[in-house]
């Protein structure tokens, strides 16, 4: 029997279709064979084919834009938003318009064209996560920017256009709608319940246990009760923390372990699917740290939109999260 | 220079990337050659291969489920929601759960496997639109149902899994989030401005004219100032009307002309792309008809999500709507 489930934070309903539940074997498989290594602009030695780097991790004896890097961040060659733009706001009839002020950067996660994020050692992945934090800290200094989105696309179905393993960072002059709704929902919950809605969600996950995937000292991965996609998985710090950027070095190390564990479970369970992940954290200089709780949302790209979702905001999900979690636990 | 634009109804921002604006020739093309005619369950003569019909248009001398139909509506063989289910609500910890009560139907638009909606005559398309109204009226009699979504997927990229031309109808025990936000936004606008926000939008469209695509006596097609997708096009009744179901016979005829005109412009302009459309109308028994204004939203499927949108609700659109409208006007 199908179920309609409502997310208590943003008020989103989803349909979980249990008449024809889908197991990992029921989703189409994708081929991610390496194709473009020979001409890749992200590979070491081709640093001059990207815009000049804005940050990197490399041994201190080497200079900027040298090929000795372990992680390298460059502006997107085709940015949606640019930092040089003057921030200009205007009204056009009934609409608000802001100039395309912001930043759009690419974090090249490894010099090795043949490694994906799932292949990185925990140490290598820690360097990537540390780079996320450094870019966040840098961009947060600009008072005109309100939010920094850190996300990753792996595979063509997830929108990746470059196969060399990378993540993206977009900094915006406003808080985008989905995040804003989540924050407002969390604030409302805090006002009415006196506690963090994400902490309450974790309590319920630990009480019911059947949606838990894996955990370590600081982090837990679980399939949320109201997913928007089959096998959607969240990674959340167990202790309340509003800002990803407040995570200390030991926390970064734990997150590297948990992210690697979770992405590798998804890879094994679902035959290396395309996926997106995005880091939901507090807005820059957010003043109510008791309300919001940062986390990473991972969406394996297994199904196409059926059109219906675009028109209604109601997703149809073919797998119950407790079943997805069981498959992931066993992978 | 890129622009960030904010929709005044639901508060959604989009980025319009004008640094690299995309013209119709810049989007990948799709092949929609007919493949499955020989085994199609929607073709006349194979009526026993679908669930028994719930409505149809056919000459009165023939009986139900006979092959003489012009338009035929059947329950979806794999419904997300079923009408036989008992409506049951419960709380599971912090979450709300409703049983999968509702309806999921397929409107087969033509007996001819080789015709798509763009090939239908105005008379044939009027029959389809009339069928939408009849199904709406029938489903609206069920007091447990709150909203009826009428939508269409054309092409694999838009989520179509059957090539025989068809639309879908889903009836829900609640108003889905995207529609609810639009309605609440329209109510708020009406409260603060004393007028319909969609009427105000049409006024601005007629004042500025550069986003208009085409029009007839009763309807206008335009590319909205804050699109979520390149070449997104809306069809709206020029006169205020809250419910699609209130459209009279002459109006249905005008809508058939306008829908055919608009879908054919999109087909010619963008080399027959996949597309979704959905009809946004008032909830069943909606009590504030001055606030909401029904319309059809058409989304050609030209680009993939880049992952970013899922995490933020912020779309990046590669074509300005006034440029899209110019291409469509000239097609």
Image: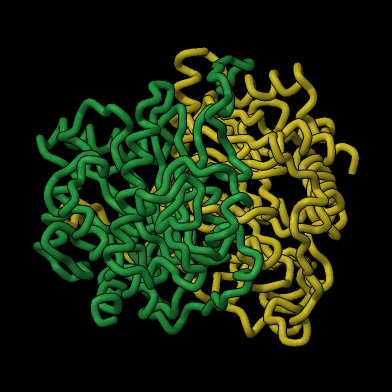
Chain colours: A yellow, B green
User: Would residue A121 be found to the left or right of residue B6 on screen?
Assistant: right
| Residue drawn at the location 34% of the way across and 59% of the way down | B227
User: Would residue A124 be found to the left or right of residue B248 on screen?
Assistant: right
B103 vs A207, nearest the viewer: B103
The x, y position of residue B15, in whole percent, is 39, 61
**Quarter of the image where the C terminus of chain B is located:** bottom left
**Image height check: is B67 above or below A35?**
above
Residue furthest toward the right? A330
User: Would residue A224 be found to the left or right of residue B17 on screen?
Assistant: right
**Quarter of the image where the N terminus of chain B is located:** bottom left
The x, y position of residue B94, in whole percent, is 59, 18
- Number of numbered labels in the structure image: 0
The x, y position of residue B4, in whole percent, is 34, 59
Residue furthest toward the front? B61
| Residue drawn at the location 70% of the way across and 51% of the way down | A300
The x, y position of residue A247, in whole percent, is 68, 39
**Image height check: is A65 above or below A245?**
below
Examine the rendering and report whether any part of residue A86 can be seen: yes
Examine the rendering and report whether any part of residue B13 can be seen: no
| Residue drawn at the location 75% of the way across and 44% of the way down | A22
B327 vs B153, nearest the viewer: B153
**Image height check: is A54 above or below A6?**
below
A42 vs B283, nearest the viewer: B283
Q: Quadrant of residue A212?
A: top right
| Residue drawn at the location 22% of the way across and 43% of the way down | B293
Q: Quadrant of residue B299?
A: bottom left
User: Would residue A121 be found to the left or right of residue B164 on screen?
Assistant: right
């Amino acid at each position: 029997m199908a179920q309609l489930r409502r997310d208590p934070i943003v008020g989103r309903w989803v349909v979980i279709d249990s008449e024809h539940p889908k197991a990992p074997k029921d989703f189409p498989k994708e081929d991610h064979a390496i194709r473009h290594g020979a001409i890749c602009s992200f590979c070491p030695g081709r640093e001059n084919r990207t815009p000049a780097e804005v940050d990197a991790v490399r041994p201190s004896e080497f200079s900027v834009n040298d090929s000795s890097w372990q992680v390298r961040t460059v502006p997107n060659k085709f940015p949606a938003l640019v930092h040089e733009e003057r921030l200009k706001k205007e009204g056009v009839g009934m609409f608000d318009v802001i100039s395309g002020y912001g930043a759009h950067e690419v974090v090249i996660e490894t010099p090795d064209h043949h490694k994906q994020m799932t292949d990185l050692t925990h140490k290598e992945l820690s360097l990537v996560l540390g780079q996320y934090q450094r870019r966040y800290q840098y961009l947060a200094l600009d008072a005109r920017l309100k939010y920094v989105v850190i996300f990753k696309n792996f595979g063509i179905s997830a929108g990746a256009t470059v196969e060399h393993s990378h993540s993206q960072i977009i900094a915006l002059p406003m808080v985008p709608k989905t995040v804003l709704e989540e924050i407002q929902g969390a604030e409302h919950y805090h006002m009415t319940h006196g506690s963090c809605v994400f902490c309450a969600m974790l309590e319920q996950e630990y009480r019911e246990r059947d949606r838990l995937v894996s955990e370590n000292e600081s982090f837990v991965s679980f399939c949320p009760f109201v997913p928007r996609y089959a096998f959607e998985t969240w990674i959340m710090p167990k202790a309340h923390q509003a800002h990803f950027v407040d995570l200390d070095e030991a926390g970064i190390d734990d997150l590297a372990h948990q992210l690697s564990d979770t992405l590798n479970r998804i890879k094994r369970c679902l035959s290396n699917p395309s996926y997106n992940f995005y880091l939901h954290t507090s807005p820059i200089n957010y003043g109510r740290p008791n309300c919001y709780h940062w986390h990473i949302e991972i969406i394996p790209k297994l199904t196409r939109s059926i059109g219906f979702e675009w028109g209604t905001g109601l997703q149809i999900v073919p797998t119950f999260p407790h079943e997805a979690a069981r498959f992931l636990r066993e992978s």
